[in-house]
Image (cartoon, coloured by chain):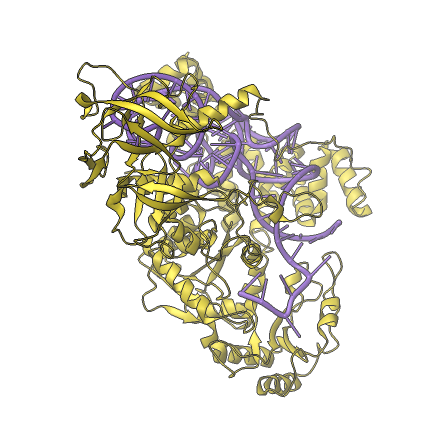
Amino acid sequence: MAKRQQDFIRAMVAEDMKTGKYGGRVVTRFPPEPNGYLHIGHAKAICLDFGIAQENAGVCHLRFDDTNPESEDVKFVESIKEDVRWLGFDWGEKLFFASDYFERLYDFAIALVEADKAYVDSQSLQDIRRGRGTVTEAGTESPHRNRSVAENLDLFRRMRAGEFKDGEHVLRAKIDMAAKNMLMRDPVLYRIRHARHYRAGDAWCIYPLYDFTHCLSDVIEQITHSLCTLEFKDNRALYDWVLNAAAIEPPRPEQTEFARLNLDYTVLSKRKLVQVVEQGLVDGWDDPRMPTIAGLRRRGVTPEAIRTFCDMIGVARVDSRVDMEKLEYAIRDDLNKRVPRVMCVLRPLKVVILNYPEDQVEELDAPHYPRDVPQEGSRKVPFTRELYIERDDFMEDPPEKFFRLAPGREVRLRHAYLVKCVDVIKDDSGEITEIHCTYDPETKSGTAPDGRKVKGTVHWVSAAHSLPAEVRLYDRLFLKADPDDVAEGEDFTSNLNPDSKVVLTESRIEPSVADAPPGSRYQFERQGYFVSDVVDSSRDNLMFNRTVGLRDTWAKITVADSAEKGERRERGGRTAREGVTKPRQRTVADDRGASPKVAALTARFAGEFGLSDEQAKALAGDPTLATLFEEAVAVHDHPKTIASWIVGEVSRRLKEGEGKGLPFTGAQVAALVTLIDDGTISRTTAKDVFAEMSERGDHPVQIVERRGLRQLSDPKTIEPLVNKLVAENPDKAAQYRAGRTGLLGFFVGQVMKESGGRANPELVKEMVEARLS
RNA sequence: UGCCCCGUGGUGUAACUGGCAACACGUCUGACUCUGGAUCAGAAGAGUCCAGGUUCGAGCCCUGGCGGGGCAACCA
C-alpha cells in the first residue's frame, strides 16, 4: 500500500493519536473573520482543518472570529458558509461565533485581573504605542501598571458598564515591557468601542482582541490542534501565556503554524483584493479572474479540482509561491473526466462547401466524450453547405508544422467529412472573408476509403443552425509572477494584465447547448473548458466563461519559433537565493561581542588544549559547558574528543532540555569518551549510551555493561552479517560493482543496524568493500 | 537594527532513529489518436544556500556566515 506522504502537521497529529495526548480526540477549527470573502488561500486552510479532522475521525468547527464590530457583517458570514459548503466540507452542528463567548471571555478577564495578571491602562493610544518601544529598544511601563487589583476591577467593570468613551481605557495583560517578543509587551486585551456588533447588537461596548479571544475560544470548544498561518508564529507565546494565566491545564489546545498559499500571477491578501474590487479593476468579488472562491466558482472551477490542488501543494513551514500550472492541471484533470464536448467557433470564418447541395442538412452523430473518457452520451450536429470554422485554423501561407486548413490542403471537419480548400475570397482591403472548399462524400466516417491520411482536424458549426454566443476569455490577472515586483513608487496594480479579460461577441456555438441551464460546463473542442455564466447567460443570450484552456502544444511551437528568431530566453540559472559568502575575518582576538572573561577563557581553552577557536568559543560562551569540559578533561586527557562531544551532543541536549540542567557530570562524559577511545564501544553506540545517560543520569560504564553494548571488532562475528546482506541484495551488489558506490552507505548502514549499532563501522566498511570488490 | 522562523531540481513537497536524494507539476523525446486534448512509454534536470566541523558515512547533528520572511493596530 502506497502510504500517502504526510506533511509535518499530519505527522504531528498521528503522533498525538499514538501517544494518546488528547485521548484520541482530534478537534480542529476554521476561524475566519466575517469581514471579507474567502479565497483559494483559505481553501488550503479549510482543506487542512477539515481534512485532518476527517482523516482522524474527528470534527472541525466553523468558528467566526467576530470580535471587531466595525468591519464585520452577516453577509460575509453567509458567503463564507456557502463557500465552505461548496468546497465540500460539513461542520455539522459545530457552527460557532466568538461573539457568543463574550460573557465567558469577560469572566476570564475578571479572573486575570483578580490574579493581578491584567490591569486597566488609561494612557492614550499614542502613549501606549510610544511606551511599547521598538524592536531594538525595550518598552517602558505604563504609569497605571501598578494599580491595585481592586481599582482595576472597578475600572474594568465600569468599562463594561459603558461609563467611558472609546479609547479612554484598555485592559492590558501584565507581562513584560522589555520582552524581545513585541507581542509580550503588555498586549491590549480589551478596548472600549461603542459600536453596534452585527450579532451581539448593543449588548457590549468593550470588545476583546484576537490574542485573548482566539486561544480561549479554542479552550471553550475543546480544540486540540489549532492550525494557523506563519504570521501568527510570534503570537504563539501569547497564546500559551493566556492559557497559563487562565490556569488551563494540558491536554489543552496547541497552536501550530504553516505557510500560507501564494499563487503565481495573482494576489491573495485581503487588502489587495479589496483594492482591485474597489478601484473597479475587476468586476466585483466574483469576477472570474479573482482568486476568490466565488470567482473560481463563477469561472467554472470545481470544488474537486480545488481540493486536488490543495492536496498537491502540500503543507510546510516555508514561504513559497505555487505555479499557476499546478492549479490548471488540477482543473483540467477533473474537467476532462466529467464534462461533455461540444463545438464552438470563437472567431468565425465562413466556409462554403461548393459541392454540397444548397438546401441539404445532415444531422451527424457526435459523441459527447472521446473514447478514453468512460462516459456515455451523444448529440446531433447539423451539417450544411455553409459553415464557420476558427479563423486561426486557416492560413494562407502556412509554416511547415501547421496541420490545419490552407490553400490546396485537406483537413477533417470534426465528426464530419474531409474538406479541401480550393479558393480564398478576400475583400478590398485584402482581409479574408470566406473560404471555398470541396468535400469528399466518401469520407463521412472521417477517414478516406482510399487510405489517404489527413493530419488535421478542425471544429466547425453550421452557419444557419449555430447560435450566437458571447465568450469571455480569462487569463492571469497580473503580468508578473510576483505582482509586488514593481518599480519605486508604483504598486501591484501597475502589473495588472490588460488582456486578462477578452470578450468575444461574435462566437457561434452548436445548437445542442440551447436548453442547458446556466452553470453548465463544457469542453469546447480544441479550445478549452467553458462554463455558461450563472448570472449573465440565458437562453436567448448565451454567455460563456473560459475556465481554462486546453494544453496547447501548437501554441508552444509558435512561441518557440518566434523566440528563436528573437533573442534566446535565458534558462536555468539560479537567481533567487544565491548564497554569497564573504571570507570570514573574525578571530577570537577581535571578538567584540564577548565579555573579557569569556574571551580569556576562550583563549585559554584554545591555547592549553589545542582546541579550534570555534570550539573554544562555544565552550567558553556557556558556563555549564565550560565547567563540564573542565571536569571531564581533569579525568580523561583527551580534550579534543571531549570538546567535540560537549559542543555537539551536550549543547544540543541543553537546548532541548530548556534550562532543566544536565543529569550527568563531566566525569561521566569523560568516562563515555574513554569507552570510545579504548575501543570498548563504537561511536554509534556511544550516541545511544549518551541518550540514556542524559535521560536518566546513569554512568556510561553501567549502561554498557547492563545492555551488553561492547563493540564487535572481531571480523569473524561480522563476516556472516556481511555475507547475508550481500546474498539478500544481489541487485544492489551488482549495481555497486557497476560503479554505484553510493550504495556503500546502504550496506554499511544495514550491517550496523543488524548488529544493533555494535559493530565497528570502520571494520564493517573494509569488509563490505572487500566482499564487493 | 533586536527577537523569532525558514533555505532540497524551474515550481511545490518527500527522504524513518544520520545509511540508495524520491514524488507531483512543468520541460523535452517517442507511440497512439477524428480534439496539436487525453492516454502510454521514456528522458533531461538538484548533490540539498555557502564555509568549516563531528562521523566509516551528513539534506538531517555542531559552529559561523549568507539569503528570504514575520514582529513595533485599541485588526485578525
- A576 or A55, which lies in front? A576
Question: On the rendered structure, is A424 left or right of A643?
Answer: left
- Say which residue appears at 56% left-offset and 76% top-offset: A207
**A573, above or below A131, in the image:** above
Residue at left offset 52%, top offset 83%: A202
**Residue A586 vertical position relative to residue A412 in the rendered view, above or below:** below
Relative vertical location of residue A393 with respect to residue A334 in this rendering, above or below: above
In the picture, which chain is purple? B
Out of A305 and A642, give the one closest to the viewer.
Answer: A305
Left or right of B57? Residue A447 is: left
**Residue A757 place in picture, x, y as percent:** 43, 33
Q: Is residue A26 visible?
A: no
* Vertical placement of residue A212 versus A144, above or below: above
Q: Position of residue A673 (x, y in %)?
A: 58, 36
Residue A609 position within the rendered picture, expressed as x and y whole percent measured from the top left: 72, 33
- Where is residue A195 drawn, in percent x and y? 57, 79
Which chain appears yellow? A
Q: Quadrant of the C terminus of chain A?
A: top left
